[in-house]
Amino acid sequence: MKITQAKINELLTEPGCEHNSQKSGEKKKVCSQQAQPGAAQGGCAFDGAMIALVPITDAAHLVHGPIACAGNSWGSRGSLSSGPMLYKMGFTTDLSENDVIFGGEKKLYKAILDIHKRYNPAAIFVYSTCVTALIGEDMDAVCQAAAKKINTPIIPINSPGFVGSKNLGNRIGGEALLEYVVGTGEPEYVTPYDINLIGEYNIAGEMWNILPLLKKLGIRVLSKITGDARYEEITYAHRAKLNVMICSKALINMARKMEERYGIPYIEESFFGIEDMNRCLRNIAAKLGDAELQARTEQLIAEENAKLDITLAPYRERLKGRKVVIYTGGVKSWSIISAAQDLGMDVVATSTKKSTEEDKAKIKKLLGKDGVTLEKGNPQEILRVIDDTKAEMLIAGGRNQYTALKARIPFLDINQERHHTYAGYSGMVEMARELDEALHSPVWEQIRKPAPWDLGNEILAESSLDWLDLPEEIFV
Ligand code: SF4
């Protein structure tokens, strides 16, 4: 798939994205504005495409470019697999100066054949980078020739870092799936209860909290796009009856185009928090349009909620009214508020940096009039908000853990590097346990004590240094 300016414009003005429509229906092209310096901080378009596609576990992911592009993006996501581990291997053509001058197409061709010979993957995704795009490598032609030779799908992903943000890269990854993968296979059988999960990457394995619930209801996840996915299941995603989008902005283009091409409706849901999980199951059942399924869903929700009431009671007692600041993006900017509020916590501020207009409306409703929203955040701003609101905890991505430490408050990692599963009903218990352990750790009492050198000499003299039996003069 050639990535032309027209294709980029199309993805940046995606009609399914809330950024592009105002209440009046007039177009508002926020995404298509010229990227500002620093826009790719936190991930370039190449990184975004990899985020969307690397969770396909039985495929090889080959980066055509200098080794640093592969190194910078490798292992930064906690997507887990229930089987193949090939997706965890880092493959790169490792271009040198010579290749930049004379071209790296032959090297790429050889690398594809070598990967096929050694690992025989279900497919090979080949990612362009800034360097290979700038020197004009014809990746599409190389992939086509190699695919013919080894009779394996070789998919070019033309998403070099300089074309834009991580979010644009996600969409380019989705476009590639639509163009090369979806519709190329057929499932063994279909049922009226087949759905796809789009934008769920199985971080820390949290999709495994959800699949048993759907199975209990008799709903089959036909294709997981792309957490813990196998290449083949994506080939027949076009046979599902419903697309359930989990991270709305990332692959919205894919859901909308599947509706256009295959008539599959889509809904946007969240797996975080009790209320949202209840709503998600209800909405799926309602969309599949079966009265018996809806009755079974209500029964399951009632059972799960009753169990949670008992399990969460001691945590709610300990977390009640504790003030928290949330700093994350996308759908999590409101779904985590809902989860924290389900536990009785007081969310005093949240970020709206990567939120859609719809996300912002949900945040406003959940936070109420006194809630603070951070449109543009940086550590100083977060520290100021923590100070102003007297927040007792920060829930954010891993990079902000030092901001929390500076404020001497506990921190919960909610982003892609997290090691705990917070989705679904069982995820709520895990989240409550983690919040409780972090908030009530005895270390905070120690950390908040003034340092000995900040205390007056008198106090220092009275302190536990007595046993040293030091001469009085040294305290003067
Ligand atoms: S693709 Fe470009 S912006 Fe992204 S890591 Fe490589 S050189 Fe950097």
Image: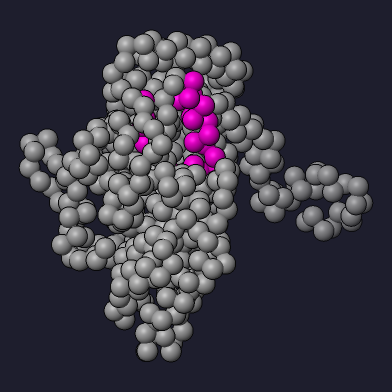
In screen coordinates, is 182 left or right of 228? Answer: left
Report the colour scheme.
one colour
Q: Quadrant of the N terminus?
A: bottom left
Give 216 or 374, whichever is nearer the viewer.
216
User: Which residue is at a point 46% across and 84% down the rendered structure image?
Assistant: 96
Image position of 396 (left or right of 3): right
345 part of magenta stretch: no
Q: Is residue 156 above or below residue 363?
A: below
Q: Does the rendering let one see residue 83?
A: yes
Considering only vertical position in the picture, is 91 above or below 31?
A: below
**Which residue is located at x 90 percent, y 52 percent?**
468
Q: Position of residue 431 (x, y in %)?
A: 55, 31
- In this picture, which residue range is highlighted in magenta? 193-216
* Residue at x 20% of width, y 42% of height: 261
Quarter of the image with the C terminus is bottom right
Q: Where is residue 292 drawn, in percent x and y? A: 36, 11
Nearest the eye: 144 or 29 = 144
